[in-house]
Structure formats: C-alpha cells, structure tokens
C-alpha cells in the first residue's frame, strides 16, 4: 500500500505530526502522587516537554499492585489519541531507590526507605525492614507452615498460649513465674509420702 502525501494539506500533516509527538513522551513527577477520589486513581503533577506541567495526571498501574511515586521520579506518559489534554502515566521509574544488587532472574518489591521483599535465586525469599516488620493476621485467620524448619536467632515474645504437639527440647534452663504442671501434678505444691524415716519417698502426687 502506498500513500500520496500530496493529497494532504500542510495543516493536516502538522496535525498528524503533533499527534505523533504527543502520543508517547517522558515525564517527571513534580509533586508526590496522591489518591484522587474523583477519578478513583492516583494522580500527580507531571512535567513534560521542558517543564510543561500537566495537573492531575492519572497513573495507570497493573491490577493487584499499587505504588505512590515520589516527586522527582521519571515516567512514561501516554497521550490518548495523540492528545496532550488526555494523558495517563503508564510506567514510573526512580533511579534514586532501585536495588542495585539483583542478578539475572531475581525480583524485588521495594520502597524509598530500603524496605524490600526479595525473590532470590535458589528459591530464597527475603523480607527486609529497616526498623520493624509487622505481619497482621485477622482474628479468625491463621498462618500454616508445613514441613521444613524454622530458625530464629533473636529473642521471641509470645503474648498468648502456645500448644506443642510434639517433643520439646531445651538446651538452656527453663524458668516460670507461675506454677508448672506435669499432668495434674503441681511443681510447687505436690507432696510425697514415705513409709519410714530414711526410706525412699513416693512419686509426687
């Protein structure tokens, strides 16, 4: 198929050229993104084409994943139908905070504070927090871990009851602020009986 451009006026060609320029362009977040209730999406002020700022530019993101880019992040903006009045940001990138230690095939979800969820080689998953990692489980939900081993190198505090359906082996001492029961026998209040002085006592009861 061939085209005879002589059939188009100069104005028509300029319009097509302008639409092509506006179709895909780079931009910079002028301010931090925020959620806009009216458009039900995250928006920002977006600078394109030498500081031409467009307000309330929507950010299109993948289903199931939301991020709120900071001012200074770069982006790719799509001008719908080649228009500069109907823009959406389809990709964002911030070189200030990207992990630099990933190798081929690895994935990391991260933020500007250094918090990361890493999917490393050899099926290793790392959850990294600079201060505190909190995992919230609803009242009627539970975490189930099957097989494998759990290794904790720091102190552990548990604020509710613990049930162990197996053998407990402790290499250090065991202390209790309250009584200890072996079956129904109290460590603090159990008694022994003895047939006569110097003879072995009975089992605790």
Image (cartoon, helix red, strand yellow):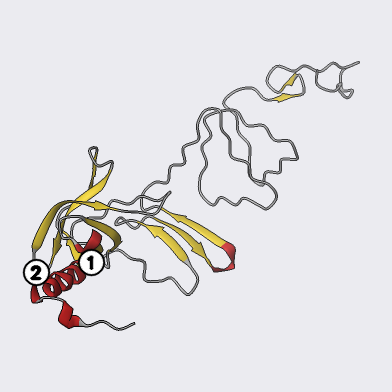
Pinpoint residue 124: horizontal percent, then vertical percent: 56, 62
Query: Which residue is the site of mark 1?
Result: 23
Give the percent coordinates (x, y) of residue 122. Answer: 59, 67
The structure residue drawn at horizontal position 18% and vertical position 60%, both measured from the top left corner, is 83
Report the Cα–Cα distance between label 1 and label 2: 16 Å
In the displayed structure, would residue 141 be above or below residue 119? above
Pinpoint residue 11: horizontal percent, then vertical percent.
9, 72
Q: Which residue is mark 2?
A: 50
Q: Quadrant of the C terminus?
A: top right
| Residue drawn at point x = 36 percent, y = 53 percent | 130
- Residue 115, disc: none
Please say if 195 is above or below 61: above
Check the image and report above or below for 140 versus 53.
above
Disc 1 packing (10 Å; few <14; some 14–19; many ≥20): some
- Taking 119 as reference, is 146 left or right? right
Instruction: Pick whichever of labels 1 and 2 is earlier in the sequence.
Output: 1
Place residue 111 in its image quadrant.
Answer: bottom left
Mark 2: secondary structure = loop
């Amino acid at each position: 198929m061939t085209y005879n451009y002589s059939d188009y006026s100069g104005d028509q060609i300029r319009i097509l050229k302008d639409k092509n320029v506006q179709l895909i362009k780079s931009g910079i977040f002028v301010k931090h993104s925020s959620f806009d209730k009216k458009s039900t999406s995250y928006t920002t002020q977006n600078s394109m084409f030498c500081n031409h700022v467009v307000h309330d530019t929507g950010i299109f993101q993948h289903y199931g994943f939301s991020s709120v880019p900071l001012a200074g992040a770069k982006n790719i903006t799509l001008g719908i139908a080649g228009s500069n009045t109907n823009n959406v940001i389809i990709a964002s990138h911030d070189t200030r905070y990207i992990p630099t230690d990933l190798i081929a095939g690895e994935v990391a979800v991260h933020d500007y504070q250094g918090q990361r969820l890493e999917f490393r080689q050899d099926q290793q998953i790392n959850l990294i927090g600079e201060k505190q990692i909190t995992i919230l489980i609803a009242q009627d939900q539970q975490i189930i871990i099957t097989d494998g081993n759990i290794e904790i190198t720091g102190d552990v505090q548990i604020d509710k009851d613990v049930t162990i359906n197996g053998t407990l082996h402790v290499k250090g001492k065991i202390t209790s602020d309250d009584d200890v029961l072996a079956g129904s026998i109290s460590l603090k209040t159990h008694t022994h009986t003895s047939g006569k002085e110097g003879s072995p006592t009975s089992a605790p009861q």
